[in-house]
Image (spheres, rainbow, N blue to C red):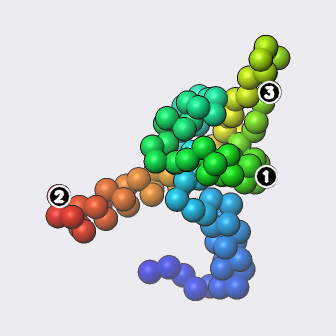
Amino acid sequence: MLSQAGCPKTMLSIRDALEAVEGRWKLLILFALSEKPKRFKQLAKDVPGITDKMLSKELKSLEANQLVVREVLDTFPPTVQYSITPHGLSLEKVLDELHFWGLVHRKRIMGS
């Protein structure tokens, strides 16, 4: 069972974390970027189901939370690529645990 010690402070830190990665897409975007930097269209392909508008919105939020960096490359026409920051990479354990929990949950709910 989760400890309730320091509850208000713990609740605040959990809320802050959830606000940084809230929603259906942000963790999937971070996972897609964990391998290597990618251009917008490649990210859109690697995160099935996300619209360009939503991807753009989520990338701006991830950038504001310093989880992703946007880099404009000196090419013609200009090329933009996104990469995960060291701060974003610090979520690796969270993603791993969420992955393992998701496997158990899927098995429990769907039966296999």
Q: Which mark is residue 112?
A: 2
Q: Considering the image in quadrants, where does the N terminus appear?
A: bottom left
* Disc 3 element: strand
Instruction: Give the residue type that dot 2 points to.
Output: Ser
Q: CA distance from mark 2 to mark 3?
A: 45 Å
Q: CA distance from mark 2 to mark 1?
A: 39 Å
Q: Nearer the viewer, mark 2 or mark 3?
A: 3
Instruction: Give the residue type that dot 1 points to.
Output: Ala
Instruction: Look at mark 3 in the image and give the residue it sits on.
Output: 72
Q: Considering the image in quadrants, where does the C terminus appear?
A: bottom left
Q: Residues within 10 Å of mark 3 (few under 14, many from 20)?
A: few
Q: Is residue 99 left or right of residue 22?
A: left
Instruction: Give the residue type that dot 3 points to.
Output: Val
> Which of the two labelled residues, at mark 1 and mark 3, occupies the earlier sequence position?
1
> Which of the two labelled residues, at mark 2 and mark 3, occupies the earlier sequence position?
3
Residue closest to the far left: 111
Q: Is residue 49 left or right of residue 82?
A: left
Instruction: Look at mark 1 in the image and give the residue it sits on.
Output: 64
Q: Residue at x 79, y 14 (%)?
A: 76
Q: Residue at x 64, y 48 (%)?
A: 53
Q: Residue at x 63, y 34 (%)?
A: 40
Q: In this view of the protein, which residue sits in the foreground, 54 or 2? A: 54
Q: Position of residue 59 (x, y in %)?
A: 68, 46
Q: Position of residue 35 (x, y in %)?
A: 54, 31
Label 2 close to label 1 by CB (< 8 Å)? no
Q: Residues within 10 Å of mark 1 (few under 14, many from 20)?
A: few
Q: Residues within 10 Å of mark 2 (few under 14, many from 20)?
A: few
Q: CA distance from mark 1 to mark 3?
A: 16 Å
Q: Residue at x 66, y 77 (%)?
A: 10
Q: Nearer the viewer, mark 1 or mark 3?
A: 3
